[in-house]
Image: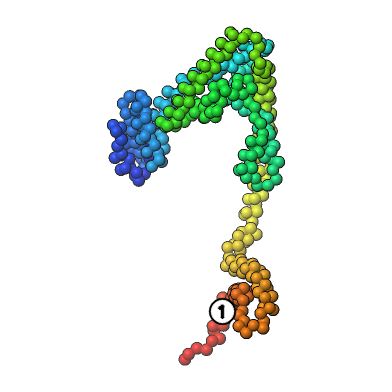
Amino acid sequence: MIQEYLFSGEKYRYEVEHYTYKSVKVKTYDIENSDCWIVTFSLDGENERNANILSVVNNFVVDKFHPTILSNGCSAYYNRALYPRFNEFERKLRKLLYLKSALSQDTGDTGVIKDLESKDLGEIFTLLFSDAQFVKDVKKSINEKTWQFTKTEILATLQQISESTLWDRLIGNDAVPSLSTDFTQVKQFRNDVMHAHNMGTASYNSALNLLKGINRQLDIEIDKIIIAKAKTPQHEDRQDFNTVIENAIKEMDTTKQDWREQLAEVQASIYTFNNEGMLAALEEYNRIASSLEFNAIKTYLSSCEFSQIQKNIEQISKIKMDISPALQEIQKIAGSIKTPEFKEPTALLELQKSLQDLKIDLENSKESPEETAEDKTDEPHEI
C-alpha cells in the first residue's frame, strides 16, 4: 500500500525525507530536467491496519506541506471496502420499495417498479426525502421578505412551514430511522466512494458504522412488510402507494424536463450573445481603449494636478462637516457673551484651521515651476 506525493523545490525535502512513523518506508525520486520530485510512503500488504497507519501519514504530509497527491493508497482501500456496503444498501432499499409496491392492493405496481428501476439512487433520494411543495413554500416566503432578514427570522419562518416527504407518508417516519435522518450524509459518503474522493480513517469509520446500522434497519423493515402482509392480507390503512409514487415520479420527470428546456434556452441565448453582442462590445471597447482621448484621460488621472484636486475636495468635505458644529458653538456664544472668561470654542478653531489649510494648498497649487524660477531671479544676490 502506497502514498505518493509530488513536490516542487527543495524547501521541504529534508524534513519530508527524514519523517518517520512506525514501520512506514520512505523513498524519494527526482524528475529529470525539473525542480519537481516525488516521495512515496509505503507498507507491505493491503489491509485496514496499514490503511489506518498511512492515513495518519497522509494527514501529516498534506496538512504541513500541501503537496499534490498522486496516489492515495489508504483512501483507495477505504473506497473499495465501502463499495459492497453501498451496493448492499441500494439493493435493500429498492427491495423495500418494490415489496411495498407489489404487496399493495392497488393496481399499477408493475409500471411503478419499472419506473423505479430506471432511476438512479440520487433520483430515488430526491423522490423519497425531498418535499417539492415545502421547497416552493420556503422560496416564496424568503422572496417575499422586503428587508435584510436575520437568521432567527428565517428559522422561525421555516418552523411554520410544514414538510411531508413521501418516505414519511408511505413508509413511515419511524421506519429505518438512521436513513430518514441521515440520508444527506449517506448520499455524500456514497458520492465520495463512487467518485474516488480522498477519504481518511475518521470518514471511513463514520460511513461504515452508518451503513451497517441502516442495512440492519432495512432488513427489519423488509421483514415487517412481509410478516404484516401474511397476517393481515387486507389493504392497510395508508395512502395508495403506487398512485402516490407514480404521481411523484411524473412530477419529478416534468420538473427535470422543464429544467432541460430552460437550460437549452440559456445556452442558446449565450451562443447568440457570444456571436453578436459580445464581439461588437469587445470591438467597441478596444477602439475606445486605444484612442488618444482615452490615453489622455488616463494620463491626467495619474497627474499631480489631479491628486491636488482630490486633496482639495477632501478638505472641502471636511469643512462642510466642521461648519455645523461650529455654528452650534457660535449660537452658544450669545448666552455667554457677557461672561468675563470667554474662550473661543474648539469647533470654531478647527473650522478656522481647515479653511487656512485649504487656502495654503490652493495658493501652492497655483504656483507653476516657471513662476517660482522667475521669482528667484528677482531676489538680490550677494556680491
User: In the image as oriented, which residue stretches furthest toward the bottom?
Assistant: 383
Give the camera-side residue of 124 and 337. 337
Q: Is residue 73 left or right of residue 177?
A: left
Task: Give the x, y percent position of residue 344.
Answer: 61, 79
Q: Would you say residue 309 is visible in this rendering?
A: no
Identify the residue at image location x=71%, y=41%.
144
Instruction: Please give left or right for residue 336 compared with residue 226 in the image.
Output: right
Compared with 285, 359 (above or below) is: below
Q: Residue at x 48, y 23 (%)?
A: 213
Quadrant (top left/top right/bottom left/bottom right) for the N terminus: top left
Q: Nearer the viewer, residue 53 or 220?
A: 220
At 63% across and 26% down in the image, what residue appears?
165
Q: In the picture shown, does residue 286 fall above or below 209? A: below
Three-letter amino acid code at the position of disc 1: Thr
Rendered position, 272 above or below 380? above
Residue at left 54%, top 24%? Answer: 177
> What is the secondary structure assignment of the residue under circle 1?
helix
Tally the numbered discs: 1
